[in-house]
Amino acid sequence: MHLLLVFLLPLITLHYSTQVANASSFSPSVLTQGSSLFVKKNDHLVSPNRVFTAGFHKIGQNAYCFAIWFSKPMYDGKLTLVWMANRDTPVNGQRSRFSLSKTGNLVLTDVGKGIWMSNTQTTSRLQLQLLDSGNLVLTQLEKKSYLWQSFSFPTDTLLPNQPFTKDTVLVSSRSSTNLSSGFYKLYFGNDNVIRLLYSNNEVTSVYWPQPWLLSWQAGRSPYNNSRNAFLDLKGCFQSTDDFKFTTIDHGVSLQRRLTLDVDGNIRVYSLNEKR
Ligand SMILES: *[C@@H]1O[C@H](CO)[C@@H](O)[C@H](O)[C@H]1NC(C)=O
Ligand SMILES: *[C@@H]1O[C@H](CO)[C@@H](O)[C@H](O)[C@H]1NC(C)=O
């Protein structure tokens, strides 16, 4: 029995590495300095576990955004986006590209015009890669640190272990068919309490926690100014203002996401593979 195990292990490893080599010949797993992903060629990056894909996603007639989504479509064929670079300024489907410049800036270009950029710069060697967590990172190869990461700039969704900080805001989409910035926001207020705000051109109002409650009446603590929250892998959300909840399917490590939906509710979704 013992011998068998020793032989089996290297076999499994070999098989795994062949699969990875095959996969990378179809879609690059990293973007290097001076290269681009082209909308027309349907170029994309895939995470090593293949759960996430980053590339151009069609959001309207000849309108695309650069996004990250779960590779597997839903039962209705739709993709679930978890991040967008340019939700408010879509690019066209002909000559747009997403490039990593030699100097270390990520730039989304629409017919020669810069639409979005990471505003990063470095003299060290870099590569852009999509991690298994769904985080798109610009890695400084010598320092092994991130110059930029999509996790620091969420749109309407947080993935497990993506930090929600004093600098991050979730903004809902306009509607289920229009993914541009909508009316609801989740953020940490100056009083260190995490809250939801509705805001259009005429009205701005906090609706959670209920504005007539003092923070302690709402079960919140204003004393921790580190302002940090996250959803863990098992479905528990925790914030430094003492707000906490667990999902009903808590405990199993499923594919989950927390989204500020178009109706102003926060929901945690988990993938049900049985559909
Ligand atoms: C989405 O909504 C924004 C804001 O109202 C609007 O400017 C834009 O044209 C809409 N996009 C689509 C594809 O309908
Ligand atoms: C604030 O929250 C952080 C993160 O949970 C924790 O490590 C720290 O001890 C807290 N500080 C206080 C004063 O409670």
Image (tube, rainbow, N blue to C red):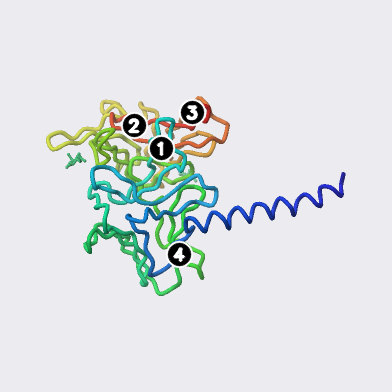
The answer to whether residue 131 is above or below residue 183 is below
* Residue annotated with mark 1: 241
Among the two numbered marks 1 and 3 on one chain, the one whose residue lies closer to the N terminus: 1
* Residue annotated with mark 3: 247
* Residue annotated with mark 4: 127
Among the two numbered marks 1 and 4 on one chain, the one whose residue lies closer to the N terminus: 4
Among the two numbered marks 3 and 2 on one chain, the one whose residue lies closer to the N terminus: 2
* Residue annotated with mark 2: 215
Among the two numbered marks 4 and 2 on one chain, the one whose residue lies closer to the N terminus: 4
Type of amino acid at the residue the image marks with label 3:
Thr
**Which percent across, then down, holds residue 172?**
29, 37
Query: For the residues marked 1 and 3, what is the alpha-carbon distance in whole angstroms?
Result: 19 Å
Name the front one of labels 4 and 3: 4
Mark 1 vs 2: CB contact within 8 A: yes
Among the two numbered marks 4 and 3 on one chain, the one whose residue lies closer to the N terminus: 4
Type of amino acid at the residue the image marks with label 4:
Gln
Mark 1 vs 3: CB contact within 8 A: no
